[in-house]
Amino acid sequence: MGQTLFVPREVLEGEGRVAASPDTVKRLLGLGFEVIVEAGAGAGSRLADAEFEKAGARLGKAGDAGGADVILKVRRPTREELAGYRKGALVLAMMDPFGHEGEVAAMARAGVVGFAMELMPRITRAQSMDVLSSQANLAGYRAVIDAAAEYDRALPMMMTAAGTVPAAKVFVMGAGVAGLQAIATARRLGAVVTATDVRAAAGEQVASLGAKFVMTDALKDASGEGGYARELTEEEKRAQAELIAGHIAKQDIVITTALIPGRPAPRLVTAPMVASMRAGSVIVDLAVERGGNVEGAQAGSVVVTDNGVKIVGHVNVAGRVAASASLLYARNLFAFLETLVDKEKKQLAVDWEDELVKATLLTRDGAVVHPRLVEAAAAAEGADDEARAGGRRRRAAPAGARGASRKPATRKSRGEN
Ligand code: NAD
């Protein structure tokens, strides 16, 4: 008798992605699962119920989660969702655990075995499970498309009988997965592209995409652990700011993607830098949900500054390309789940000592088990109990929700998020 796997419709408003595709349903059946997909789960990704059925899934309703051994999700389950899950069920999702320790503790209390896909180690064996890369790639692409849509001039140079339209100048800050895809996309649209990063290794990758790498001599290399960036020293920050200030005033479009693991996003573009850009220029801050690279960016809004610069702060940018993002995410999930199954016996067989399991496992047997979360969750649990006991504790607003110092015109992001 096979084990049951459930794919719910995401409950977070504006989340159009889904954790399975007809392709992965077929593969999941091959692993021996009975697959139930909640009706309408794929609607936001243009995956019709009939397609899931054709692939061999049974259509179900939210309540079917209660009988499932495995639940595949995009977002961390809410407390309401958790209340309907079976103890011991495996739940795979992008859990966004840091800063949400109380929610992780709730998962432990619900007795589910929670895996955070974004904590997957970036090693060769796990490349196909790397949700950060699959989603950042699409976010980088979409950032350029969003910028082009907001920009009221053309991106490519056009030589016409009526005159020449100059190519737009695009500057990409942070040349990791999202940044490199942004560079490639902007180049394909015919823009003149420059890019910067604090990791020297990024320079070659930028050049290989046909963009110019902009870097100051004062900043040789700020590569940190695991190929990520480290935070800059004050002196390095000053040198970088000087370099950017000179460059940015000449740019038409700026895309920022800079992140430092475990830290708020570095502030790279200051209000005076924004003020130095000409009217009609566009800045897209892909780091807005992590505190923002750009002063004045607002999560979920397009801000228009006094000097006519648009600062785009869409959230869940990968979700703005939901149909593509879901297909890649579903494959990431399948690749990991496959390692948790005994293919001969066609049943779940989690190797708790496997490094991928150890790195991603958040909760098991009623407890928070991830080393980085154990302490923090205990503290949050205490705070939660206090709140339940009557104290009305306000959570600190996320850094990304910080408003601009002035009050520029804002427009809410379009419905997708
Ligand atoms: P990230 O999302 O953590 O950061 C985005 C970029 O911002 C990085 O390139 C970082 O160097 C840059 N940055 C940080 N501070 C900056 C600052 N002050 N100014 C300018 N730029 C700044 O990074 P990521 O996209 O996840 O990629 C990080 C690294 O991991 C890269 O070396 C990438 O090639 C590598 N990677 C490896 C694998 C794998 O081996 N499977 C998969 C994906 C990425």
Image (cartoon, helix red, strand yellow):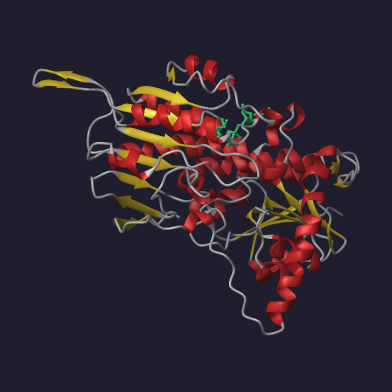
Residue 235, above or below 306: above
* Left or right: 65 as drawn, with respect to 199: right
Given residues 229 and 178, the one toward you in this image is 229
Q: Nearer the viewer, residue 282 or 126?
A: 282
Q: Point out residue 286 in the picture as x, y percentages from the top left corner.
A: 47, 42
Looking at the image, which residue is at 43% across and 30% down? 172
Name which quarter of the figure residue 310 lies in.
top left
Q: Is residue 228 left or right of residue 242?
A: right
Classify the position of ligand 1 by quadrant: top left, top right, bottom left or bottom right. Answer: top right
User: Which is more toward the observer, 185 or 373?
Assistant: 373
Q: Is residue 135 above or below residue 72?
A: above
Q: Residue at x 54, y 59 (%)?
A: 398
- The quarter in which the C terminus is drawn is bottom left
Q: Is residue 289 visible?
A: yes
Q: Residue at x 71, y 60 (%)?
A: 101
Q: In the rendered view of the protein, which quadrant contains the N terminus?
A: bottom right
Quadrant of residue 247 within the rendered picture: top left
Residue extending furthest front?
A: 235
**Can see residue 67?**
no
Q: Residue furthest bottom?
A: 390
Residue 78 in the figure: left or right of residue 214: right
- Total number of numbered labels? 0
Rendered location of residue 164, percent (x, y): 15, 20
Q: Is residue 157 above or below residue 137?
A: above
Give the image quarter of residue 167: top left
Task: Give x and y (percent) for residue 259.
Answer: 56, 39
**Residue at 59 percent of width and 19 percent of height:** 201
Question: Can you give x and y, in whole percent of width and height, for residue 54 in the image?
Answer: 61, 48
Using residue 25 as the reference point, say whether residue 232 is left or right of it: left
